[in-house]
């Protein structure tokens, strides 16, 4: 199963706009994707562990292995494409 760690912040306007897209698309892949939302204000350990310097950032993992990192918001179609590429 693919895990996506979605680093976000409540004060981040792009994160607020992108959040509903993330929720919608990951629900479409519910049997293939595990979404973990991480607020950078309350999870310093995760932020430093993945060297997150901007939000939104998505880290795609298979097991404990990072297979992709994407910084910034994107369209629904772009996210679907990244998920498809990362699953296969």
Image (spheres, grey):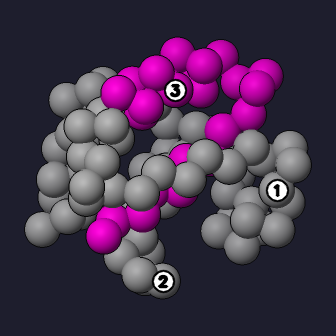
Which residue is at a point 48% across and 83% down the rendered structure image? 64
| Side (left or right) of 14 relative to 11 | left
Q: Quadrant of residue 52?
A: bottom right
- As for residue 7 lying within the magenta part, the answer is yes
First in sequence: mark 1 or mark 3?
A: 3
SS at badge 1: loop
Q: Residue at x 33, y 37 (%)?
A: 27
Which disc, if any, is residue 19? 3
Mark 3 or mark 2: whose residue is earlier in sequence: 3
**Of residues 31 and 17, which is closer to you in this image?**
31
Q: Which of the two residues, 37 or 17, is positioned nearer the viewer here? A: 37
Label 2 neighbourhood size at 10 Å, few (<14), some (14-19), many (20+)? few
The residue that mark 2 highlights is 64
Disc 3 packing (10 Å; few <14; some 14–19; many ≥20):
some
Residue bounds of the magenta highlight: 1-24
Report which quarter residue 25 is drawn in. top left
**Which of the numbered marks, if any, corresponds to residue 43?**
1
**SS assignment at label 3:** helix
Please report contact status of discs 3 and 2: CB closer than 8 Å, yes or no.
no
What residue is drawn where x is 46% and y is 21%?
20
Q: Quadrant of the N terminus?
A: bottom left
50 vs 36, nearest the viewer: 36
| Residue 67 appears in the rendering | no
């Amino acid at each position: 199963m693919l895990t996506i760690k979605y680093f976000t912040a409540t004060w981040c306007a792009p994160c607020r706009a992108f959040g509903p897209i993330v929720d919608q698309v990951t629900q479409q892949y519910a049997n293939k994707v595990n979404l973990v939302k991480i607020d950078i204000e309350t999870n310093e350990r995760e932020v430093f562990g993945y060297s997150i310097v901007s939000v939104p950032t998505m880290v795609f993992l298979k097991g404990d292995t990072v297979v992709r990192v994407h910084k910034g918001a994107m369209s629904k179609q772009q996210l679907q494409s990244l998920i498809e590429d990362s699953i296969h």
